[in-house]
Amino acid sequence: MRVPAAALVLLFSILFLSPVVGEELYNKYCASCHHPQKIGVSAPPLIPETLNRYKDEDLKKIIRDGLPSTQMPSFKNLTDEEINRIVRFLREDIAYNWSSLDIQNSKVVIEEKPKPLPIKNVKNLTFVVERGNNKIWLMEGSDILDKFEFPNVHGGIKYTLDGKNFYIPARDGWIAYYRINEKNEGSLHSKVRACIYLRNIALTNDGKYLIVGCILPQTIEILDAKTLTPVKEIKVEGKISAVYDLYKENKAIFTFRDKPQIGVINTQDFTIIYKQSVEPVEDFFIDPFDKFLVGTSRQGKKLVVYDLERFSLVFEGSMESMPHLFSASYWYKNGKFYFATPHVGKTYISVWQMYDWKFIKNVDVGGIGYFVKTHPATDYLWVDNSTDQLVLINQNDFSKKIIYPEKGKKFTHTEFNGDGKLAYLSIYDKYGSLIVYDTYSLGEIKRYPANQPVGKYNFVNKSRNFYPGLFGEEIFKEKCWGCHHQTQEAFGPSFKEISKKRTESQIIAQILDPKNSYKLLGYKRNSMPAFNFNEYELEAIVKYIKSFGE
């Protein structure tokens, strides 16, 4: 059979010419925003890790029609064959690199006049990500204090403990530095691109360095937190799951999603010691007392808990599917510590008891959710389920209450302000909203129009070292409220007075053994019962008491 000449020309161009021609078209129309190596400039990187979720037809449509509410234009001038060639080139592997020099050269100092911020309580500062408009909002209470542009935000925003420095990571490796100066003025100060594809960031416990977990290239980058200049590059072999600092020690912990190792970084000299794990740990959190790593793997069907002092496995729990532990939430109730987590592809959350580790129960939420949040100021777990429902689960009996923040539009992700009096809810829609709720009355206080609002990050709730104090607030309500008030004298002295007059050891002695300690404190008689607190309850209540002397 004779093949037509035109068909042969087309076949030849597909097999031999299309990748080259596709590259030329890419460089002409795409490279100025996406970089000649496809690693992104002002637009996201176009690499397998960002493109695999798209089918070829999706990519063709995006090229032809653009993306509304973004800087991605339409290229209706291109023929179907030219678009096909660009897509084929996007699927081609290409060598890319990102060095310390590239990091240094990427730094941008933003010459923006700082804006006066009427901050009343830094612990109530909350950042909101408005994905559809590539905006970040800074809020306190129900008020928006500032807005600025920063796209592709991913993972937790990190804060220094004075509430003056905030670090915002983006999936494409950029990190923004928002600073509040001594005049209480805030602005986006600078930004730097630490890598091509970023997993998350951590801040050392002294606030001096940023630790950046990178998937492309496979490195851990250490940046000076004030200047964003690279300090050290640590090459790793594997895909980092996440990196978290320990606030009690000069250490940070990271794991790999593709090999069974746990890395321990010394945050003074940035040396690394590796420990073996039973299996790869793809998702994990460090418990609020800095004692344990709670993790899981996508392939496995178990939850694992490692003691961080000995790096020994102390618990394994079976499950049907991978939990999303980054979205887990913790609370204290009736003398026990708990956490709850959603699960990939399942319509329930699971509840677990911490420290005497055990599974409690699964609670069906009516849909596949992504976030569980709670706070001492509420008796509920606030859960989304990929519908227009907010599911409130009572912490005592796990009964459920359904609220519809906006009927017919998807609700996602609750965050509380620092004192827990307010909850922020996202209506994830192009014509969505950021809604502020009263956590006591469950009534709406304020609503702001927003284009696909997603994560919210409160200063207290995203800093693990505040969690013992949050637990302490719950312990106070259960055990201490009958005799003590936080700031006013009641039957017993206020926590404010105690924190100023007594050392930590004196407070501990009075809690555990008041019969023998009251005379040392100058009392003529003792009316306080002894509390048989475990080490975690004791640390929590002491930290809560001491917070009133700060």
Image (spheres, rainbow, N blue to C red):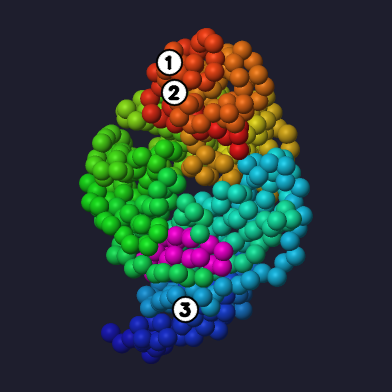
Residue 197 position (above or below residue 439): below
Q: Which mark is residue 372?
A: none
Q: Quick one: SS at disc 3?
A: helix
* Residue drawn at (34%, 30%) of the image: 355
Sequence-first tag of 3 and 1: 3
In this figure, which residue is indicated by the disc labeled 3?
101
Which circle marks residue 516 in the picture?
1
Residue 219 located within the stretch drawn in magenta: yes
Q: Can residue 192 be seen in this view?
A: yes
> Do labels 2 and 1 touch, CB within 8 Å?
yes
Residue 530 appears in the picture as rendered? no
Q: What element carries label 1?
A: helix
Q: What stretch is highlighted in magenta?
A: 209-228
Q: Distance between the residues labelled 2 and 3?
A: 55 Å
Q: Is residue 362 magenta?
A: no
Task: Residue at 36%, 39% (x, y): give it.
Answer: 291
Badge 1, how many Cα within 10 Å: few under 14, some, many 20+?
few
Classify residue 511 as left or right of residue 176: left
Question: Disc 3 and disc 1: Cα gap in Å?
Answer: 63 Å
- Dividing the picture into quadrants, the one containing residue 512 is top left
Q: Which amino acid does label 1 sit on?
A: Asn
Which is closer to the viewer, label 2 or label 1?
Answer: 1
What is the three-letter code of the residue carrying label 2?
Answer: Ala
Front residue of this view, candidates 306 and 98: 306
Which numbered mark, 3 or 1, is in the foreground of this view? 1
Quick check: 479 above or below 409? Answer: above
